[in-house]
Image (cartoon, coloured by chain):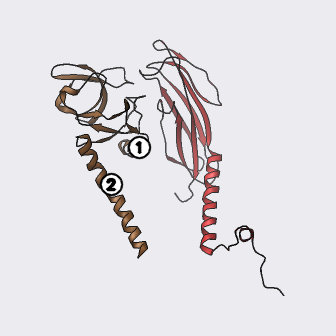
Chain colours: A brown, B red
Amino acid sequence: MRFILNTAVYIGIVAGLLFGLPRFLTWYLETPYPMAAITSGSMWPALHEGDLVFIEGIKKEEIREGDVVVWRNPNGFTIHRVVRLDEDTFVTKGDANFNEDSPVRYEDVIGRTYQVFGKNARIPYFGMITVYANKR
Amino acid sequence: MNDEQRPGWWERMTGERLKTSEKVAGIFFLLVFLFVFYVTLDANKYAAQVKAIEGEGRVGVNPTSERLDFGDLSRGTSAVRTVSITNDTAVPFFVSVIKVGSIASLTKVDRNNFMLRRGDDVQLEFTTNMPASAEIEKMYTGRVYIFKIPAPFL
């Protein structure tokens, strides 16, 4: 009986974490996409391939030069640094890239990387499954 | 005739006898440890390094056979080094390459996580690109491990 109770509590905790954590992060970070895996080295050394980063929702007027933002594009999502703000669009560039990206519309922005003590909050290697899946 | 067995080392040390399940678990973990130990010992290990230098299109080569030395690279340039691996045994190997250190993010290998069958000879190509965000005069170092895991049933 004790074993069954322990197992039930354990399963409850794991299920709570699996289903509850994304919902909590969605609510806390105010975005439907609170986590993202880094699948390339274009933001090295700020972000590494395989990192899992947290994304917070952001309004157009809150975007600043130097922010690392996530935006939606036809191929999926891109996480790059803002280098220039214009009226209807803004320009980004990966830190490790030599060229700037095409201008991005403000309405395509998903959010900005969540910062802790002024640094991007990231969990190394936790995004490796996504990286591996993308390469298959 | 005395049927009593002399207590074993474990029993003398702890005062308790090992159960059969504990003996089986102990042997299992010992075999796993020996397997991991063998694979780690048998792995090809290379020190890897590259230095970021100022300028455009500058590449300085320091070829050595003992290490993966990519020399001096300016931003936007790249260097390639190859490592040859051969399977001279009858047992197929599963080959896995792991890179660690600051050079790991800069270096790509053309082939990873593959089977190496008997008699196969494969050239692994390591390419290091120096990105725009590389720190000038900094030496990026690390290690490359090529694990050859025996996989007789694959």
Residue A136, by quadrant, is: top left
> Relative to B21, is A99 above or below?
above
Q: Residue at x 62, y 30 (%)?
A: B67
Above or below — where is A113 with respect to B112?
Answer: above
Amino acid at pointer 1: Met
Say which quadrant the N terminus of chain B sits in: bottom right
Q: Residue at position x 16%, y 31% from top? A: A107
Q: Earlier in the sequence, mark 1 or mark 2?
A: 2
Residue extending farthest to the top is: B55
Q: Residues within 10 Å of mark 2 (few under 14, many from 20)?
A: few
In this view, the residue farthest toward the right is: B1
Q: Which of the two discs, 1 and 2, sits closer to the camera?
A: 2
Establish whether labels 1 and 2 are both on one chain.
Answer: yes
Which x, y percent locates residue B74?
Answer: 48, 17
The residue that mark 1 highlights is: A128
Q: CA distance from mark 1 to mark 2?
A: 18 Å
Residue A33 placement: quadrant: top left
Which SS class for mark 2?
A: helix
Q: Name the mark on residue A18.
A: 2
From the viewer's perspective, tell me whether residue B80 is left or right of residue A72: right
Residue A20 percent location from the top left of the image: 29, 53
Q: Nearer the viewer, residue A93 or B7?
A: B7
Could you tell me residue B142's position as x and y percent?
A: 56, 32
Q: Are marks 1 and 2 in contact (CB under 8 Å)?
A: no
Output the chain of dot 2.
A
User: Is B138 left, or right, of A37 in this rendering?
Assistant: right
Name which residue type carries label 2: Leu
Label 1: element kind: helix
Residue A45 x %, y %: 43, 28
* Number of residues whose C-alpha sits closer than 10 Å to that of mark 1, classed few (under 14), some (14–19) or many (20 or more): some
Q: Chain of mark 1?
A: A
- Is B125 in front, or is A46? A46
